[in-house]
Image: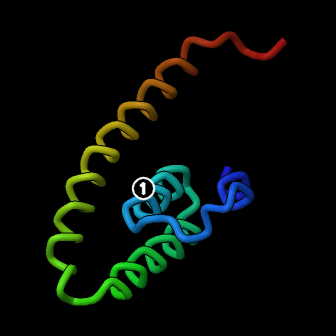
């Protein structure tokens, strides 16, 4: 999925997108890739300068909370749906 995004030319994604990607990777069990994404997001925020730090962190924090809630619901639904799937023939 990430390579498709990069192929479309989104090489400098916004910090909140990077944070969401980090969360998705972490929830998917790809902790090391998630940590790299998180570090990139932090660096991207640092590049914006201190004058924007507080407002940017607050905005990203709110976005991330909403995405985390949605992602957890999706994962729970996926887990419950796989419990009802018949075994492979």
Q: Is residue 79 above or below residue 57?
A: above
| Residue 82 percent coordinates (x, y) | 57, 21
Q: Quadrant of residue 86?
A: top right
Q: Quadrant of residue 6?
A: bottom right
Residue 61 placement, left or right of 14: left
Q: Is residue 74 above or below residue 4?
A: above
Question: Going 48% across and 52% down the picture, which residue do you hit?
Answer: 24
For the C terminus, give its image quadrant. top right
| Residue 68 percent coordinates (x, y) | 33, 47
Label 1: few (<14), some (14–19) or many (≥20) C-alpha neighbours in 10 Å? many
Colour scheme of the picture? rainbow
Which residue is under mark 1?
20
| SS state under label 1 | helix
Question: Going 40% across and 63% down the picture, which residue do you hit?
Answer: 19
Q: Residue furthest right?
A: 89
Question: Going 44% across and 72% down the picture, which residue do you hit?
Answer: 38
Q: Nearer the viewer, residue 43 or 34?
A: 43
| Residue 39 percent coordinates (x, y) | 45, 80
How many marks the image carries: the answer is 1
Question: Going 45% across and 35% down the picture, which residue do you hit?
Answer: 75
Q: Nearer the viewer, residue 3 or 48?
A: 48
| Residue 70 percent coordinates (x, y) | 34, 37
């Amino acid at each position: 999925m990430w390579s498709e995004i990069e192929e479309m030319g989104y090489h400098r994604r916004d910090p909140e997108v990077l944070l969401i990607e980090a969360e998705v990777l972490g929830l998917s069990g790809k902790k090391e890739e998630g940590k790299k994404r998180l570090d990139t997001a932090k660096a991207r925020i640092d590049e914006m300068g201190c004058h924007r730090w507080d407002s940017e962190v607050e905005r990203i924090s709110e976005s991330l909370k909403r995405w985390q809630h949605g992602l957890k619901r999706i994962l729970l639904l996926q887990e419950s749906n796989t419990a009802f799937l018949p075994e492979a023939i």
